[in-house]
């Protein structure tokens, strides 16, 4: 009965795949599948459209200062208050202009009291000499200064007070009058007058950072050494951000860009990779505790006679964990244990064996996904290095060799950028697959099929951009078929880009069109499943990269018979090699 259900489930998934990649979805004829010229032009329009729909702005330090000054001027003008007072208000309300206006017009007196802005400025006494409230020395009136409260302090004490506060950190932005009973705010107007150049620069830096770090709409780029910030339109869809430093990250969680996986899954995956749980699973799956001292012992070869390490030195049988003094020829010798076999038949070891087997299966499953996740990350890093090399060295050489201006070779850079992006997406599909529920068999089968097709399509693009391009780099002069190569690479870039974009959208919706009821897969023709094909401007539906007749198994074949795909990292290697050039995994 179970086998019939499995066959029924497989047939349902097969029908979904057929609907996905055949003409039933309205994909047109095979002649239209790889219309590279049309795809390339469409892709250019897609890029333009994407730029128009960009929901974030990259801010340099000058941009941040400009935005900050504009906000201060706006509040100062609307509320008719000095700039330093507007700055204090914005800082208190996390640089939200709307919130400042709402709170101010709702209860101005309460706001003034909360931030330390007095209704009227109190002037210092006109006495000939005044006593400093900190050092208690008498100074002429002209050498004394005060905040809006009128409490007088000498210049030296003010400088020491402000300098100490600035040295303590960003708390100096909320500085108040030194008088313990006074809450009057000390604004930037006094900082600029009373402090040294170094302290002014520090204060200015804290104020700049406050505009980013306290502002819910802006975040720093998390890349090491990057000084750009990102202003995001909250509630506008995708959180993926690409900084001007070329680092892509998720604006929501500040981890690297991870579509199609959500932030919660990424957090779980990163925690799992760094946690000790897998170490414990490995110990449970591959070791047994010494019966005497309980230290875990791994047996990787040899007979069943185990001797624990000093100072324990207990000798025991690996199988039944009994003392070795009770073992010998009568119990099965050095490579067997009759006592263990008898006890096992009676069920004495069922629980411990079951736990060990579960730990082993869990570890193997995690290792499977983690190795491929990490290997795709390594492949992405290598692709980034190749992209840098292409931009700084090889493109100029190719331009000279093929007598083509560099402006007409941008299709190569676009191909490498697409490879880098696809490697990132492919990497995170393994985290997606790890947390895909085991009981959703149809969805898991369909996901693995799509993942396999994505790998195949990406390898075709990578092969063309790396191996086939090398022929033109090594050439001594212009080659007549270079324009054909341009068309092929541009087309592969477009097809792969469309496939991966639609794959991401399908995974983000949880493959909702693949039903799980009674293990039956269903797919509506208006669903996201069908959207894995891409539509051109002329209305023709283009086939996705790596489309097949729907065999139900991930395709690992290549157009070029001289290549083999690595089982671990999917890298395309020459047929003559036996070790993967990317991850050094043996064929």
Image (cartoon, rainbow, N blue to C red):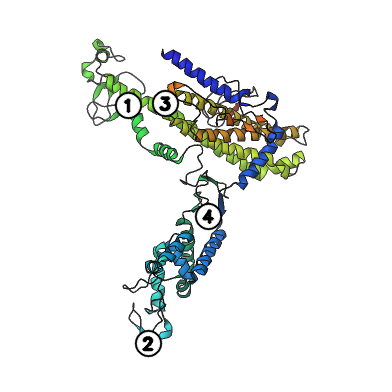
How far apart are the two marked residues, 2 and 4, measured between alpha carbons? 49 Å
Quadrant position of the N terminus in the picture: top left
For marks 3 and 2 on the same chain, the one whose residue lies earlier in the sequence: 2
Q: Name the residue under label 1.
A: 287
Please give left or right for residue 538 compared with residue 199 in the image: right
Residue at image coords 57%, 34%: 502
Q: Mark 2 points at which residue?
A: 129
Res. 413 visible in picture:
no
Q: Where is residue 545 in the image (x, y as percent from the top left)?
A: 62, 29
Mark in the foreground, 2 or 1: 2
Q: Name the residue under label 3.
A: 438
> Residue 175's quadrant in the figure?
bottom left
Q: Mark 4 points at which residue?
A: 227
Element type where label 2 sits in the image: strand
For marks 2 and 1 on the same chain, the one whose residue lies earlier in the sequence: 2
Element type where label 3 sits in the image: loop
> Residue 485's quadrant in the figure?
top right
Quadrant position of the C terminus in the picture: top right
For marks 1 and 4 on the same chain, the one whose residue lies earlier in the sequence: 4
Element type where label 4 sits in the image: loop
Residue that protrudes farthest toward the bottom in the picture: 128
For marks 3 and 1 on the same chain, the one whose residue lies earlier in the sequence: 1
Q: Mark 3 near mark 4, Cβ–Cβ under 8 Å? A: no
For marks 3 and 4 on the same chain, the one whose residue lies earlier in the sequence: 4
Mark in the foreground, 3 or 2: 3
How far apart are the two marked residues, 3 and 4, measured between alpha carbons? 43 Å
Local crowd at mark 4 within 10 Å, few (<14), some, or many (≥20)? some
Local crowd at mark 2 within 10 Å, few (<14), some, or many (≥20)? some
Q: Position of residue 577 (x, y in %)?
A: 59, 25
């Amino acid at each position: 009965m179970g086998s019939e259900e499995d066959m029924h489930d497989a047939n349902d998934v097969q029908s979904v795949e057929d609907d996905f990649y055949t003409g039933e979805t309205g994909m047109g004829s095979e002649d239209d599948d790889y219309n590279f010229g049309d795809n390339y032009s469409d892709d250019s329009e897609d890029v333009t459209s994407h730029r128009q729909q960009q929901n974030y702005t990259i801010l340099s330090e000058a941009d941040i200062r400009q935005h900050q000054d504009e906000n201060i001027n706006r509040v100062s003008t609307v509320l008719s208050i000095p700039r330093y007072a507007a700055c204090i208000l914005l800082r208190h309300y996390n640089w939200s202009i709307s919130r400042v206006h709402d709170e101010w017009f709702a209860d101005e007196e309460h706001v003034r009291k909360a931030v330390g802005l007095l209704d009227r400025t109190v002037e210092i006494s006109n006495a000939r000499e005044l006593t400093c409230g900190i050092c208690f020395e008498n100074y002429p009136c002209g050498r004394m200064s005060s905040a809006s409260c009128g409490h007088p302090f000498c210049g030296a004490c003010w400088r020491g007070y402000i300098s100490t506060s600035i040295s303590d950190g960003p708390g100096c932005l909320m500085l108040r009058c030194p008088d313990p009973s006074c809450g009057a705010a000390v604004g930037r107007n006094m900082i600029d007058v009373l402090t040294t150049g170094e302290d002014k620069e520090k204060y200015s830096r804290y104020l700049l950072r406050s505009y980013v770090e306290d502002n819910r709409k802006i975040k720093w780029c998390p890349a090491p050494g990057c000084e750009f910030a990102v202003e995001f339109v909250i509630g506008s869809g995708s959180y993926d951000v690409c900084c001007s430093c070329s680092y892509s990250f998720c604006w929501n969680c500040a981890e690297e860009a991870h579509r199609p996986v959500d932030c919660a899954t990424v957090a779980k995956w990163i925690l799992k990779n760094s946690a000790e749980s897998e170490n414990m699973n490995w110990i449970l799956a591959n070791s047994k505790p010494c019966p005497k001292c309980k230290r875990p012992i791994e047996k990787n070869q040899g007979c069943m006679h185990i001797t624990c390490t000093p100072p324990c030195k207990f000798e025991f049988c690996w199988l039944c964990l009994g003392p070795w003094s009770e073992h010998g020829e009568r119990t099965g010798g050095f490579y067997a244990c009759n006592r263990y076999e008898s006890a096992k038949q009676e069920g004495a070891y069922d629980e411990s064996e079951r736990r060990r087997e579960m730990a082993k299966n869990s570890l193997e499953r995690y290792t499977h996904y983690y190795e491929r996740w990490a290997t795709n990350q390594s492949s992405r890093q290598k692709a980034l290095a190749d992209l840098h090399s292409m931009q700084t060295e090889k493109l100029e050489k190719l331009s000279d060799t093929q007598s083509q201006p560099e402006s007409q070779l941008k299709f190569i850079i676009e191909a490498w950028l697409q490879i880098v992006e696809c490697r990132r997406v492919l990497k995170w599909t393994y985290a997606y697959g790890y947390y895909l529920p085991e009981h959703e068999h149809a969805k898991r089968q369909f996901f693995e099929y799509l993942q396999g097709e994505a790998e195949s399509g990406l390898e075709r693009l990578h092969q063309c951009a790396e191996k086939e391009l090398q022929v033109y780099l090594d050439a001594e002069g212009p080659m007549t078929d270079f324009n054909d190569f341009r068309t092929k690479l541009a087309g592969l870039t477009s097809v792969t880009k469309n496939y991966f974009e639609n794959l991401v959208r399908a995974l983000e919706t949880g493959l909702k069109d693949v039903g799980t009821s009674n293990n039956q897969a269903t797919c509506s023709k208006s669903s996201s499943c069908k959207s894995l094909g891409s539509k051109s401007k002329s209305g023709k539906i283009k086939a996705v990269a790596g489309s097949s007749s729907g065999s139900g198994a991930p395709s690992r074949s290549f157009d070029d018979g001289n290549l083999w795909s690595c089982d671990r990292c999917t890298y395309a290697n020459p047929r003559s090699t036996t070790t993967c050039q990317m991850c050094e995994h043996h064929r």
